[in-house]
Amino acid sequence: MSPRDAASVRRPYLSAADELRHNPEQWSAYESKGHCVVLAGPGSGKTKTLTIKMARMLSEDVQLPRGIACITFNSECAGELRRRLEKLGVSEGRSVFVGTIHSFCLKHVVMPYARLAGIDIPDKVAVALPSERERFYEEAFAEVYGGLPPGGQKSFDKYRRTHLDRQSAAWRGDDNDVAELIERYETHLRGNGLIDFDDMMLLGLRLIEENK
């Protein structure tokens, strides 16, 4: 961040931080270094405290090429965080990411590093539509079991999300048919230049766990 950028962040966040001084818990979270968990009910000022703290960290603690990721669980929350941060002079850029865990994994883990780690993903990544996911699941199911699936994918999704190490004996040992179904489904996805939402998380986790 340039001195001019730092100055533009400093003034709004310092003014906003004055409002936190009257609440010892908020002030403690704002000033904390290292790991910090904020537990509080709705309307208690969690988002306010965290966004002001993020502006402070960008100005005082974080220097390029490092940055800060502000991650939430849905797009609505991400939008609210962006609005609040913009009022503090913080906008997304090289050193700031604001978004969902899925978008973070895709943009900052999977897309830049998957192929470097030998994971086969399309050159131009596109996310499968629900209708495409359903079609590829049905095609894979027919290849493994014959016929159409009875309905629902709970066992498929659970197995895929909990059996993360596909080199382990448990990957096929716990249920060889479901493992085969998952592999065929993913082959259909990749063959059409697609990944799905679970891929974003699962591939991201795999990359982080397996590659220092």
Image: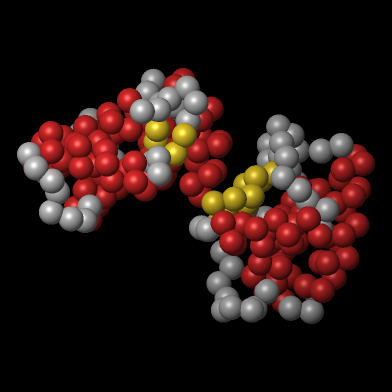
Can residue 48 be seen here? yes
Can residue 202 be seen here? no
Question: Can you give x and y, in whole percent of width and height, for residue 200 in the image?
Answer: 43, 41
Question: Can you give x and y, in whole percent of width and height, for residue 175 in the image?
Answer: 11, 43
Seen from the viewer's position, the closer of residues 74 and 24 is 74
**Quarter-wise, where is residue 85 in the image?**
bottom right
Q: Residue at x 90, y 50 (%)?
A: 8
Seen from the viewer's position, the closer of residues 84 and 149 is 149
Residue 167 to residue 175: above or below: above
Question: Can you give x and y, in whole percent of width and height, for residue 53 in the image?
Answer: 73, 59
Horizontal side of residue 23 vs 170, given as left or right: right
Q: Residue at x 48, y 30 (%)?
A: 125
Q: Which residue is drawn at 81% across and 60% down?
A: 87
Colouring chosen for the image of the structure: secondary structure
Horizontal side of residue 203 vs 148, given as left or right: right
Q: Residue at x 21, y 48 (%)?
A: 156
Question: Can you give x and y, in whole percent of width and height, for residue 68 in the image?
Answer: 66, 45
Horizontal side of residue 211 vs 137, given as left or right: right
Residue 29 to residue 94: above or below: below
Residue 31 to residue 165: above or below: below
**Quarter-wise, where is residue 76 in the image?**
bottom right
In this rendering, the count of numbered labels is: 0
**Quarter-wise, where is residue 84 in the image?**
bottom right
Q: In which quarter of the image is the N terminus?
A: top right
Furthest-left residue in this view? 146
